[in-house]
Image (cartoon, rainbow, N blue to C red):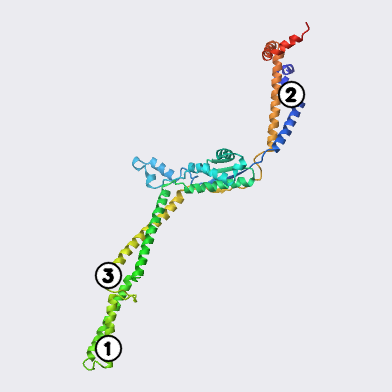
């Protein structure tokens, strides 16, 4: 058994390995020292990661909508739409859209410009910078619905800052992209509300101008007070005229009492005429101009109230659309923030030394196996002459000049 092992390929390979063990050890030590020195010259990189989530993105597909669908499948055909009748359709956020925004060129370019990565990467164009940036950044979606954003940079703080900026810029892009009917409706409602606000301001200015021109701040109240005032004046005038008629038969028209009552009657008549025609110094408008003023005021008031109602309706609709948009729009929320890492991600010097040393050991053992197998073929009585002849012929074909030189050197 020992003789068969000694003459076998494995035995010869083990014996050759033992005979060259010192050389193998020296080679591994040299490779280890060289790889250690090479690892010290490599540029260091740190990796920072953050875990984000889109609210509603990790809901199970078998929620209320799934249960309603199963119930509809079990019921007869006429009642198969029970899930739709119950209003249980769930609108999950578009995770593919969020992923596309996270890895979009717009976000990457903003990161490159903000952190001046063109100079750090030493590239001439933005396309080259994007290629290198794509090699350092990593974004993937876990089966549970979480986004993991990682970045490798030449400093701990820069890696964490870039990850946080990627999430921030992505949220800004998501807030501007029109992705739902609610957002389109909200934008249209904002335009309509702006137009309604301008129209309302014009109507308010018209009402203000009317009040300044006519003095009618509260037309209905002022009209009622004006009628009451005229009624009081008329009553006082009738009483004064009755008193004047009563004393005219007993008192001379030149007496002081008679003249006093006559002046009172004249004053009341002039006051009634002024109030009926309108007095610029009075807060009460004249009765002859009151109907036209009230007609104009009613038209302006109707126009103002109509525009105010439209404005309030649009404003209420806009607020409801904002709530619906906030509910439906995908937004990234940070679960685990990116913080500067304590350990570098590259180079792992110990791992590199062990790996290169193992490769050197494997190659040396492989080379010894190749040499041992070649010697076994050449020393074998059945295959040796054939392979020696093949090697001699190949040598003559590859180096034809050596043969002629040897012939010239032979003594004649």
Q: Position of residue 213 (x, y in %)?
A: 34, 69
Q: Position of residue 66 (x, y in %)?
A: 43, 43
- In this picture, residue 180 sits left or right of residue 412: left
Q: Position of residue 88 (x, y in %)?
A: 41, 47
Residue at label 2? 17
Question: Residue 261's mark?
Answer: 1
Q: Helix or strand or loop: what does disc 2 sit on?
A: helix
Question: Residue 291's mark?
Answer: 3
Compared with 403, 20 (above or below) is below
- In this picture, residue 80 sits left or right of residue 101: left
User: Looking at the image, which is closer to me, 250 or 29?
Assistant: 250
Q: Quadrant of the C terminus?
A: top right
Q: Position of residue 222 (x, y in %)?
A: 32, 73
On the image, which quarter does residue 43 sit in? Answer: top right
Compared with 7, 295 (above or below) is below
Sooner in the amino-acid sequence: mark 2 or mark 1: 2
- Judge the density around disc 3: few (<14), some (14-19), many (≥20) Cα neighbours within 10 Å: few
* Outermost residue, right side: 411
Q: Is residue 55 visible?
A: no
Contact check, label 2 and label 3, Cβ < 8 Å: no
Q: Helix or strand or loop: what does disc 1 sit on?
A: helix
Sooner in the amino-acid sequence: mark 1 or mark 3: 1
- In this picture, residue 234 sits left or right of residue 133: left
Q: Helix or strand or loop: what does disc 3 sit on?
A: helix
Q: CA distance from mark 2 to mark 3?
A: 123 Å
Compared with 55, 378 (above or below) is above
- Judge the density around disc 2: few (<14), some (14-19), many (≥20) Cα neighbours within 10 Å: some
């Amino acid at each position: 058994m020992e003789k068969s092992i000694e003459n076998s390929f494995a035995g010869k390979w083990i014996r050759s390995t033992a005979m060259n063990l010192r050389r193998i050890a020296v080679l591994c030590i040299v490779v280890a020292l060289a790889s250690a020195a090479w690892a010290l010259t490599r540029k260091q990189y740190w990796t920072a990661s953050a875990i984000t989530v889109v609210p509603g993105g990790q809901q199970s597909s078998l929620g209320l909508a799934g249960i309603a669908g199963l119930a509809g499948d079990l019921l007869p055909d006429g009642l198969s739409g029970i899930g739709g009748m119950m209003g249980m359709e769930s609108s999950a956020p578009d995770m593919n859209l969020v992923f596309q925004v996270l890895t979009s060129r717009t976000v990457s370019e903003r990161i490159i410009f903000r952190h001046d990565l063109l100079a750090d990467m030493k590239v001439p164009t933005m396309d080259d910078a994007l290629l290198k940036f794509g090699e350092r950044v990593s974004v993937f979606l876990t089966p549970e619905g979480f986004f993991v954003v990682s970045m490798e940079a030449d400093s701990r703080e820069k890696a964490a800052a870039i990850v946080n900026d990627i999430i921030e810029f992505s949220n800004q892009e998501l807030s501007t992209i029109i992705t739902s009917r609610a957002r389109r409706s909200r934008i249209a409602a904002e335009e309509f509300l702006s137009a309604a606000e301008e129209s309302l301001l014009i109507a308010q200015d018209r009402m203000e101008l009317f009040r300044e021109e006519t003095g009618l701040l509260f037309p209905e109240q002022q009209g009622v007070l004006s009628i009451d005032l005229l009624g009081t004046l008329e009553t006082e005038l009738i009483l004064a005229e009755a008193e004047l008629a009563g004393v005219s038969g007993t008192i001379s028209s030149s007496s002081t009492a008679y003249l006093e009552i006559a002046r009172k009657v004249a004053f009341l008549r002039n006051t009634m005429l002024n109030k009926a025609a309108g007095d610029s110094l009075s807060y009460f408008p004249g009765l002859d101009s009151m109907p036209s003023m009230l007609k104009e005021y009613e038209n302006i008031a109707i126009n103002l109230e109509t525009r105010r109602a439209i404005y309030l309706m649009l404003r209420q609709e806009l607020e409801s659309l904002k709530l619906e948009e906030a509910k439906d729009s995908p937004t990234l929320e940070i679960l685990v923030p990116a913080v500067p890492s304590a350990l570098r991600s590259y180079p792992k010097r110990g791992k590199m030394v062990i790996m290169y040393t193992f490769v050197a050991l494997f190659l040396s053992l492989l080379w010894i196996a190749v040499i041992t197998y070649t010697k076994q073929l050449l020393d074998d009585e059945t295959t040796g002459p054939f392979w020696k002849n093949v090697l001699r012929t190949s040598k003559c074909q590859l180096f034809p000049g050596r043969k002629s030189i040897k012939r010239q050197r032979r003594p004649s």
